Amino acid sequence: MGSLEVSKEAHKSKGDLDDIYTGDGTVDFHGQPAIRDQTGKGVAGIIILVNQGLATLAFFGVGVNLVLFLTRVLQQNNAYAANSVSKWTGTVYIFSLVGAFLSDSYWGRFKTCAIFQAIFVIGLVLLSLTTQIFLLKPRGCGDETTPCESHSSWVIGLFYISIYMVALGNGGYQPNIATFGADQFDEEDPIEGYSKVAFFSYFYLALNLGSLFSNTILGYFEDEGMWALGFWASAASAFAALVLFLGGTKRYRHFKPSGNPLSRVCQVIVAASKKCRLKIPPGEEILYEAEGTEKSTVAARKMLHTHGFKFLDRAAFVTSRELDQLKQNEYNPWRLCPISQVEEVKCILRLLPIWLCTIIYSVVFTQMASLFVEQGDAMNTKISNFRIPAASMSSFDIVSVAIVIFLYRRVLDPLVHRIRKKGLTELQRMGIGLIIAIMAMLSAGIVECYRLKYAQKDCKHCQGSSSLSIFWQVPQYALIGASEVFMYVGQLEFFNAQAPDGLKSFGSALCMTSISLGNYVSSLLVSIVMKISTIDNMPGWIPRNLNKGHLDRFYFLLAGLTAIDLILYIACAMWYRSMKLRGKCSENKEDQVYGV
C-alpha cells in the first residue's frame, strides 16, 4: 500500500508541474523553466504584434518611395535608381539569413531582435539627419518640380551607410520576430497550440496594416517633397517599437540557442560518410541518442526517428569503438551523432523541395510592385479632376488581406473543422494560395487584353492612354491579397512548425529568401522574354510603350508556369512527412501526410 501511495503522489506532483510550467522547453528571462501563467500567451503576443506593425510602418516609410528619393533628391536616372533599390531590397533578405543564424546559434531570438532593432533605429535617425541637414538643398527641393543640387561624395556615402544600416537592422530583425512571437505559445498545450497557429495570421495582418499607413499617409508626404518629415516619422515609429518590445522583457518566453547549425549538419554528413561501407542492421534501438547533460547540442525537445534518408542514419550507428568511448562518457561528434541531430538534417532536406516550389509564387507576387503599376499607369486614372496614383492600387491588396484573414479565421476555418473534424493543413493552404495566384494572373491578362482594345497605339507619353478605368485592376490586386493569406501565412506556419527547435528562425528566413529569389527570377524571366520576343525588330511583349506590346501574354505565361509549379508542389507535398517530437502532444505520433 505504501509504495502505491508514493507512486500516486509522485504522479500527482508531476501533473502539477506540467500545469505550472510550459511543456515545450521554453525558459524565462532568468533562464529558469517558464511559468505558464506568468509568461507568454496573449499579453506577450499582442506586444509583439504591435511592435511588428510599428516596425513595418517605419521600414516601408523608407522603402516605398526610395526610388523617387534617388531620382528627385540624388538626381539618379531611372535605371540606376531602380538597380540601387533592387540591390538594397536584396540586401535586406540576405541580412535575414545573418539574423537567423545568430539567433539560432548564439544570441537567442530576444537578444537578436533587440540588437537589430537598435541598429534599425540608429540607421533611420542617421538617414533623417543626413536628409534634413545635407541632402535637401536648396530648401524645399525633392518634389516633382524643384530639383536638388548635387552633393559631395562623403554626403552620398553617409546616405548609403544610413540606408544599409536600415537594411541590416530590418533584415536581421524580421525572421526572428515572427518566430519569437510564436515562441510565446506552448504548442504542447492544446489551447495555446491553437493560439500559436492563429498568431501567424494576425502577424501578417499587423505587417500589412503597418505598410498600409506607409503607402498612404507617409507616401503622400514624401511624394510632396517632405522627405525629412517622412523619415523622422519612420524613426519615431521604430523607436516606439523598440521601447515597446523592451517593455515586455519579463513577460517573454525563450528557447535557448543550440549552437552553430552548420557544424551540426556537417557532422552528420561526415559521420554518415565515414560509415558508408558498414552494414547497418535494421531497427531503431541500435541508433544513438544523447541523454541528460551529455555533449549533445540539439534542441530541448528530442526528435524521434523517422524513415527516409536512411543513409544519414549511419551517423547515429554505434560501432564497438564508439561504444567504449561512450562508456567513458566521451565520443567524437564527427564520427557519432545523436539521432535527434540526424533528424535535424532530415528535416532540412525535406523542407527544401517545398521551399523551392514557393519561389514561382514569389515571382507572381513581385508583379504587384512592378508590372501591375506600369499597367495601371497606362489606364484611365482620373475620377473627375482627381488622379489616382497607380502605385496606390496596392491598398486593395492590403484590404483584401485583412478581409480574407477575418473570413478565414471566423468563417472558413470553423466550417472546415465542422465538416472534416480538422482544419486545413499548412501545405493545403499553400496549395490553395497557388491556385488563387493562377486566377490573379489570368485576371491581369484579361484586363490587359481589354486595356489594349481601348488604348491609343501611337502615343508618345502613354500615361492614361487607355480609356479603360484603373479600377478594373481591383480583382487582380484582391486575388493577390487572398493568395498571400493562404501562401505566406501558411508558409510562415509551416516552416515554423516543421523546422527543428534549433532552426526556427532559419525557417522564417526561408520565407524571406523565397521573396528575394522571386525578384531575381522575375528579372531573369523578363530579360529572357524580351530577348526572344524582340527578334526581327519586333517591339517585344513589354516595351517602353505598353500599347505596342503584349503584356497580357506575359501574364498568361506566369499563369502557365504557376500551374506547372502547382503540379510539382502537389507531388512534393504528398511526398512530405512531418518530423516527430517527443512531447506531451506529439509523442509516438505517426508520420503525418501533409498532402494537398
Image (spheres, helix red, strand yellow):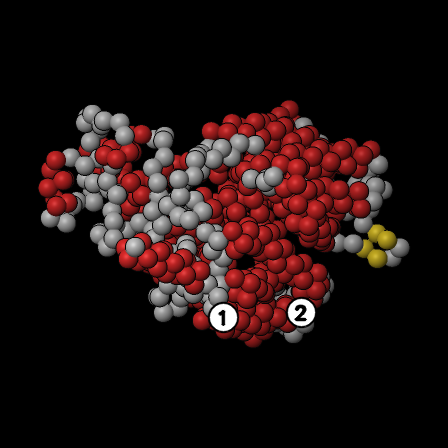
Q: Nearer the viewer, residue 379 or 115?
A: 115
Q: Position of residue 308 (x, y in %)?
A: 36, 30
Q: Is residue 584 above or below residue 247?
A: above
Q: Earlier in the sequence, mark 2 or mark 1?
A: 2
Q: Could you say whether the residue bearing mark 1 is in a helix, strand or loop?
A: loop
Residue for point 36% across, 69% down: 30
Residue designated by label 1: 248
Left or right: residue 251 versus residue 324 is right
Residue designated by label 2: 226
* Extreme residue toward the right, this view: 384
Quarter placement of the N terminus: bottom left
Q: Is residue 255 visible?
A: no
- The amino acid at mark 1 is Gly
Q: Position of residue 424 (x, y in %)?
A: 59, 39
Q: Nearer the viewer, residue 435 or 41?
A: 41
Q: Nearer the viewer, residue 24 or 72?
A: 24
Residue for point 70% across, 60% down: 216
Mark 2 vs mark 1, CA separation in Å: 34 Å
Numbered circle sitting on residue 374: none
* Extreme residue toward the front, this view: 1
- The amino acid at mark 2 is Met
Quarter placement of the C terminus: top right
Residue for point 15% across, 35% down: 319
